[in-house]
Image: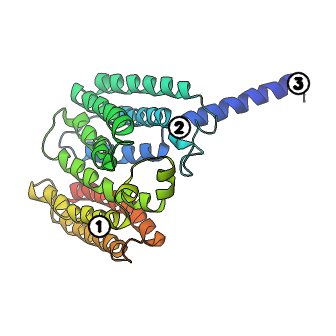
């Protein structure tokens, strides 16, 4: 093998690693959730648009989520290197230059918002801009290092994608898509507080004021359970306003009752202590729970 061939192979491998790192900057797991929830919002809307418009709309929403993720990693690079959960991200490992991440995030933001405005409508583009702005400036820069309520208020940014999916199809904000917003908004605290219980040492090391650190284990367990109870009236609202039928109501309540149970099971453990297995169960089931709720929205629309 010649020196030139080795050099080309080396350059190709470096390019592949760099491009892969750019994808990781966009938080693919979060993007997959955004694809799913925004698609549900789009498909449950009363107005239908072409397949191409739908794909382009969801693509730009997902790109916007990726932009928010990249900007989040740019700003939090100093924290990420301190935590076991995030220390292998592209910036802490040196695979991506921090300034490159900033430029990449800004470019993605401009492309996603502009693209959604051009291929969809102003309302959708404005909501996507609000999502990116809220996630970066309100949650990441302002709240995350300031208050244990960071995830409660910051959850609003993660709750907007299905609303955007709806507006892509309708070019209007009505009552129905806000039920998506409420479900994700009230689901978020218990989900992330369960994670923060067994990752508390990480957050403490990074000096992030998560609830177990500021209020203690007992208060965290209590609030996880309380927020799971909030989900009961929240899943009834879509049925109450006539957005869904009995099928959604019955099965969403069954799923929620079980969510209440696993959160209570975590709460009732010894005072000021928790069982890691039970905290992980709450965290894992919460993901499955949210996924099934949105599947139910689709199924309900199909059979009605």
Counting other residues with Cα less than 10 Å from the Cα at mark 2, is it few (<14), some (14-19), or many (20 or more)? Answer: some
Residue 188 rendering spot, x and y as whole percentages: 32, 53
Q: Dot 2 lies on which element?
A: helix
Counting other residues with Cα less than 10 Å from the Cα at mark 1, is it few (<14), some (14-19), or many (20 or more)? Answer: some
Q: Dot 1 lies on which element?
A: helix
Residue identifier under label 3:
3
Q: Residue at x 55, y 33 (%)?
A: 22
Residue 254 rendering spot, x and y as whole percentages: 25, 71
Residue 249 rendering spot, x and y as whole percentages: 18, 65
Q: Quadrant of the N terminus?
A: top right
Pick the residue in front: 21 or 122. 21
Residue identifier under label 1:
222
Residue 175 rendering spot, x and y as whole percentages: 12, 45
Q: Dot 3 lies on which element?
A: helix
Q: Real-space Cα distance between discs 3 and 2?
A: 39 Å
Residue identifier under label 2:
78
Pick the residue in front: 90 or 217. 217
Q: Residue at x 14, y 57 (%)?
A: 237
Left or right: residue 50 versus residue 195 is left
Q: Comparing marks 1 and 3, which lies closer to the viewer?
A: 1
Residue 190: in sight, yes or no? yes
């Amino acid at each position: 093998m010649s020196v030139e061939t080795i050099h080309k192979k080396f350059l190709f491998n470096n390019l592949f690693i760099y491009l892969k790192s750019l994808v990781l900057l966009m938080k693919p797991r979060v993007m997959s959730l955004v694809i799913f929830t925004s698609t549900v919002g789009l498909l449950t809307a009363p107005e239908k648009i072409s397949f191409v418009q739908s794909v382009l709309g969801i693509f730009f929403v997902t790109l916007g989520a990726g932009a928010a993720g990249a900007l989040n990693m740019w700003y939090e690079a100093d924290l990420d290197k301190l935590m076991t959960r995030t220390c292998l991200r592209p910036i802490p490992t040196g695979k991506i230059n921090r300034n490159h991440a900033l430029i990449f995030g800004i470019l993605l933001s401009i492309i996603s918002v502009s693209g959604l405005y051009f291929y969809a409508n102003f309302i959708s583009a404005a909501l996507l801009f609000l999502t990116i702005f809220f996630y970066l400036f309100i949650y990441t820069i302002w709240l995350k290092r300031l208050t244990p309520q960071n995830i409660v208020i910051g959850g609003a940014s993660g709750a907007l994608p299905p609303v955007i999916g709806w507006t892509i199809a309708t070019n209007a904000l009505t009552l129905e898509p806000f039920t998506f917003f409420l479900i994700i908004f009230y689901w978020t605290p218990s989900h992330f507080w369960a994670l923060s219980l067994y990752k508390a040492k990480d957050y403490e090391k990074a000096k992030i004021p998560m609830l177990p650190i500021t209020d203690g284990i007992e208060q965290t367990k209590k609030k996880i359970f309380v927020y799971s109870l909030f989900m009961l009236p929240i899943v009834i609202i879509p049925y109450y306003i006539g957005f869904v039928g009995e099928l959604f109501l019955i099965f969403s309540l069954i799923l929620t009752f079980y969510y209440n149970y696993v959160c209570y099971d975590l709460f009732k453990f010894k005072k000021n202590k928790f069982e890691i297995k039970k905290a992980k169960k709450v965290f894992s089931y919460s993901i499955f729970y949210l996924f099934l709720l949105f599947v139910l929205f689709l199924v309900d629309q199909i059979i009605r």
